[in-house]
Amino acid sequence: MPRAPKPDLNDAFFALSDPTRRSILEQLGAREAGVTEIAEPHDMSLPAISKHLRVLEQAGLLTRRVEGRQHFLRVNPDPLQQAKQWIERQRVFWEGSFDKLAEHLERMTAESPPSTPKSSKSRKP
Amino acid sequence: MPRAPKPDLNDAFFALSDPTRRSILEQLGAREAGVTEIAEPHDMSLPAISKHLRVLEQAGLLTRRVEGRQHFLRVNPDPLQQAKQWIERQRVFWEGSFDKLAEHLERMTAESPPSTPKSSKSRKP
DNA sequence: TGCATAGTTAACCTTTTGGTTAACTATTTC
DNA sequence: GAAATAGTTAACCAAAAGGTTAACTATGCA
């Protein structure tokens, strides 16, 4: 039986529950951007965006690199991975039965070390 | 580029952002339970649980079956699937490059129809 | 030096959240 | 019919969320 909700999951899921914050993550994708650039498409004051960024940062979803007067934000996928895995883990129970669980665990352990890519097309450039 | 945040995702992620609500989902797993039973392990009044259940229900994460004076709640995995897919979709961009995307899409389309179980050991009992 | 740019912090406001207790509705059981 | 059981609704409360504007810090640039 799954128990003991990890404290970080609260922050991660909470951060994701706001459409502006999800939009910021979508907007960033893999690249880096400054606060003003991030704020631009959102119909909202700069301090409001600043708050959202802090929420995302404290949830570990963004990392900040300060260079001069500019703050560059970048997505950190780790907490999202955890969030996804919580969902996966639950799904195993919903989909029911324990052979499905075994199947799932096999797939997880096969997937989890990214050092063994299925296809060697290319790795993270 | 991913855009247009689905409105349901707000509710789903928000529902998941509370540890009590996640705990309820974990506790339920695949089975059905009444409100009092659900409330029992949580150090909280019944109305408080009732509210949490309503949040989960309105997010589509629980379905309610009323039988006499008892309300039976059961997990509905669909919105979680959407939430997971949002994360997946984002991850594709963080992990970067587009061959990863292709790989991902292949795996998704291969996984999505649950009507083709890999092992016929047993089905949902 | 002085001004523009990038961003945060402070103070404030309204709405929502998450909890409480008390009262209510509906069903079952004696 | 009365009492127990299952659960919701109502009214309330404190704290947090999400936004605002104004003031501030710090850097870049003429």
Image (spheres, coloured by chain):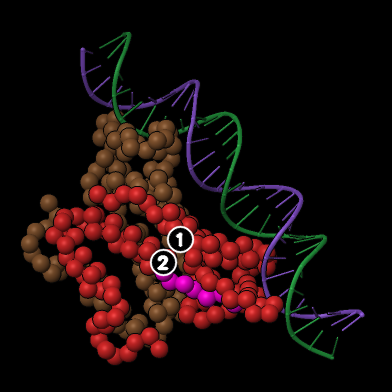
Chain colours: A red, B brown, C purple, D green
Identify which residue is drawn at 23% across, 55% down.
A93
Q: Is disc 1 surrounded by few (<14), some (14 to 19) or many (20+) residues within 10 Å?
A: many
What is the distance, in whole Å, between disc 1 and disc 2 at their CAs? Answer: 7 Å
Q: To which quarter of the image does residue D21 belong?
A: bottom right
- Residue in the foreground of this view, choosing between B84 and A118: A118
Percent position (x, y) of residue A84? Answer: 35, 64
Residue B10 appears in the picture as rendered: no
Q: To which quarter of the image does residue B67 belong?
A: top left
Give whichever of discs 1 and 2 has the lower sequence position: 1
**As shown in the figure, which amino acid type bears the numbered disc 2?**
Leu
Q: Is residue C13 above or below residue A9?
A: above
**As shown in the figure, which amino acid type bears the numbered disc 1?**
Ala
Task: Indicate the secondary structure of the residue bearing disc 2.
Answer: helix
Percent position (x, y) of residue D19? Answer: 66, 59
- Residue in the foreground of this view, choosing between D7 and A115: A115
- In the picture of the structure, the residue carrying the numbered disc 1 is A12
Magenta-highlighted residues: A72-78
Identify which residue is drawn at 21% across, 57% down.
A95
Q: Chain of mark 2?
A: A
Q: Is residue D9 above or below residue B86?
A: above
Residue A69 appears in the picture as rendered: yes
Q: Is residue A77 magenta?
A: yes
Outermost residue on the left side: it is B121
- In the picture of the structure, the residue carrying the numbered disc 2 is A80
Do tag 1 and tag 2 residues touch (Cβ < 8 Å)?
Answer: yes
Q: Is residue D21 left or right of residue B17?
A: right
